[in-house]
Image (cartoon, rainbow, N blue to C red):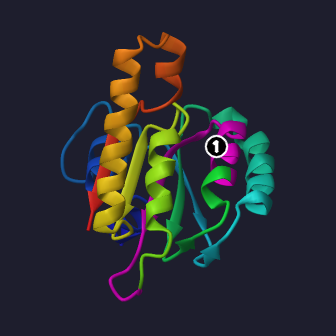
Amino acid sequence: RLDDFLSCHFPSNLIRTAIVCPLCDLCPSASFNFRSFSMPARSYVSFRSEGKMLSKLYRKHEQFSDAIFNLQFRNSDFNGEFVETLLQTLHRCPMFKSLSFSRDSSSSGLDGSTMLSYLACNCPSWVQYLTFDGTLSQTAVNLWIDLLSAMTKRLHLHGQSQSVQETHGALYGLAIIN
């Protein structure tokens, strides 16, 4: 049951076993200290009202800054200003170190999956783990690769300052499961 619970909140086996809570192997660096906020399964056009709620939760949970906080979306679709407003929330709530987007095999459609590609390339540096489980179309994966390649080339060609490099793209774990 514990494994089912963890796989629901942390779909990536990499994050689940190596970082958060290894059940089979002893991993001295594992924290076992995590919190996961599951967002309701629905179609998101914006994240403004949810962002306000999470900002209040952030103030309440600031003392747990060493914990790995995960923000989970399951069986949801994304449209409109969702990515922009989620990014604003992440900048206001630096406690979230992990984002996971998952879809059950019985759920239909990948509405808004290309929007998630833009999200992956623009997350604040403290978001270290991203999981996409059944949520990205092939087009979205290709777009994400193109965006990441362009961002990397731009940083290297133009000799951007360290502060620009620290703001985006500091992922330690990325899982794309389709």
Q: Nearer the viewer, residue 137 or 2?
A: 137
| Residue bearing mark 1 | 90
Picture coordinates of residue 63 (x, y %)?
69, 33
Picture coordinates of residue 6 (x, y %)?
39, 62
Residue 81 visible in the displayed image: yes
Q: Is residue 94 left or right of residue 163?
A: right
87 falls in the magenta region? yes
Counting the numbered discs, the total is: 1
Residue 172 visible in the displayed image: no
Q: Is residue 10 above or below residue 166?
A: below
71 falls in the magenta region? no
Q: Is residue 170 left or right of residue 87?
A: left
Image quarter hosting the N terminus: bottom left
Query: Callout 1, which amino acid?
Result: Leu
Picture coordinates of residue 44 (x, y %)?
64, 71
Q: Which residues are magenta?
A: 85-108
Quarter-wise, where is residue 13 in the image?
A: bottom left
